[in-house]
Image: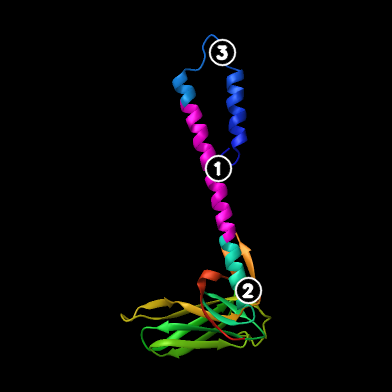
Amino acid sequence: MAGNFNQFLTLLTTQLQHQDPSNPTSTDSFTSELAQFAGVQQQVETNSNLTSLLTATQDTQMTSGIGLIGKTTTATSSALPLQNGNGSMSFVASVAGPVAIAVTDSNGQVVKTDTVTAQVGTNSWSWNGVSDSGTQLSDGQYFVAVEGTDTTGSSTALSTTVSGTVTGLNRTSSGVNVQMGDTSIALSDLDGFSGA
């Protein structure tokens, strides 16, 4: 009912029409109900105004995001775009040593594994789209996970920063996303970009 104030007015008039004339609603109760109806009307208007504000914000993001199309950008995400047979990402290691990398497809199947020796700081890794079985996989969205060790020697998941070329924008219920081929990443997760 919060979405339609007219329903409340209908309820109010129906209540008035069906009152028992020998036992009318008390003025205190009636005043309280009118105040509740007024409050609901304000909530409906507030929701409408917030929806308009959200739409305007997303329109602004879409307009500013158009300049990213065709540019290479990075994003803090585990969604790894494979574009033109290439995918790349980076991660930060707190200690030097072996790091395990696993790439999964959209079904959660591991398609590529790798072990690299990480240096302290930012490390880069690229993938040519060839699976562990030697098959060239099609472009699309994959997911990457990196596991290394922390300063205590315990195994830990490392955050990944993926890179790709922006091919479009789309609006979702949670905001504006950039498309890197078939990979969709929230605009707010972008870290930076460079020329085409």
Please, what secondary structure does the residue beneath circle 2 have? helix
Q: CA distance from mark 3 to mark 2?
A: 63 Å
Left or right of 68: which side holds 160? Answer: left
Comes first in the chain, label 3 or label 2: 3
Note whether residue 174 is visible.
no
The answer to whether 106 is drawn above or below residue 192 in the figure is above
Which image quarter is the N terminus in? top right
At 55% from the left edge and 88% from the top edge, which residue is drawn? 126
Tell us which disc is closer to us: 3 or 1: 1
Q: Residue at x 57, y 52 (%)?
A: 51
Residue wearing tag 3 = 20
On the image, numbered disc 1 is attached to which residue?
44
Identify the residue shown where x is 44% and y is 85%.
99
Question: Which contiguous range is marked in magenta?
Answer: 32-56
Q: Position of residue 82 (x, y in %)?
A: 62, 81
Which of the two discs, 3 and 1, labels the residue nearer the N terminus?
3
Q: Give the prevailing secondary structure in the magenta stretch.
A: helix
| Number of other residues with Cα within 10 Å of mark 3, as a class: few under 14, some 14 to 19, many 20 or more | few
Q: Amino acid at mark 2?
A: Ile
Image quarter of residue 41: top right
Q: Residues within 10 Å of mark 2 (few under 14, many from 20)?
A: some
Residues at marks 2 and 1, CA–CA distance in whole angstroms:
33 Å
Q: Position of residue 62 (x, y in %)?
A: 61, 68
Q: State the separation of the CA atoms marked 3 and 1.
A: 31 Å
* N-term mark: 2 or 1: 1
